Amino acid sequence: MALTLWISCDDEALFRTVSNVELGTYPDDILTGKLENEGSIANMRHAFVLGGKGIWIPKDTDQEYPFIHIRNSSAYREGLILTPYSEIDVKYHSEKRRKQTIEERTGIHRVELYGDEQEDFIERVFRTYQTHPLINKFVERDHHLLVYSSRN
């Protein structure tokens, strides 16, 4: 299955050191491409922080909420999730225990995306990752985000 990739225009030279995927333009200083071999995304984890795009569907609803899950940031060992709405505090529901946020349950850090739902999701992800004061970047790799998705 092919993956869609997005990187900042500033990271094109770095991307060329780990892949020869053809990149096209995406709005707002972002490049996009298709990676045919899904397994080769692992080769990029040493140069880029990898953000996998996922969809969260709360119980008893058909509403889909996109999010980005980053697993290889040096600043967040348990992971980092970028979510578009404050309502996605991703509660774990159980009748036997109290409701808990994702931070309380798993140790994953959550940051709400800048902007509103009228704006492009991928643009919001890059703007938030690059400028949000709560997103720490300890090593060089942490400054280079690559977002990928198996969904189109």
Image: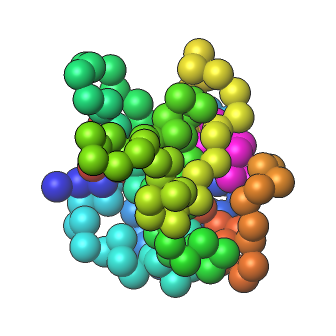
Is any atom of residue 10 visible in this view?
A: yes
Q: Residue furthest front?
A: 96
Residue 29 locus on image (x, y percent): 69, 43
Whether 126 is among the magenta residues is yes
Whether 32 is among the magenta residues is no
Camera-side residue of 32 and 38: 38
Residue 32 in the figure: left or right of residue 114: left
Q: Residue at x 60, y 72 (%)?
A: 76
Residue 131 locus on image (x, y percent): 80, 50
Q: Residue furthest top?
A: 118
Q: Residue at x 26, y 29 (%)?
A: 59
The residue segment tinted magenta is 124-130
Residue 138 falls in which quadrant of the image? bottom right
Camera-side residue of 57 and 30: 57
Quarter placement of the C terminus: top left
Camera-side residue of 72 and 20: 72
Residue 46 locus on image (x, y percent): 52, 83
Residue 126 locus on image (x, y percent): 65, 47
- Relative to 13, residue 81 above or below: above
Residue 36 in the figure: left or right of residue 89: left
Residue 19 falls in which quadrant of the image? bottom left
Camera-side residue of 34 and 151: 151
Is any atom of residue 31 visible in this view?
A: no
Q: How many marks?
A: 0
- Relative to 142, residue 31 above or below: above
Quarter placement of the N terminus: bottom left
Q: Residue at x 64, y 38 (%)?
A: 113
Magenta stretch mostly in which secondary structure? helix
Q: Residue at x 56, y 47 (%)?
A: 82
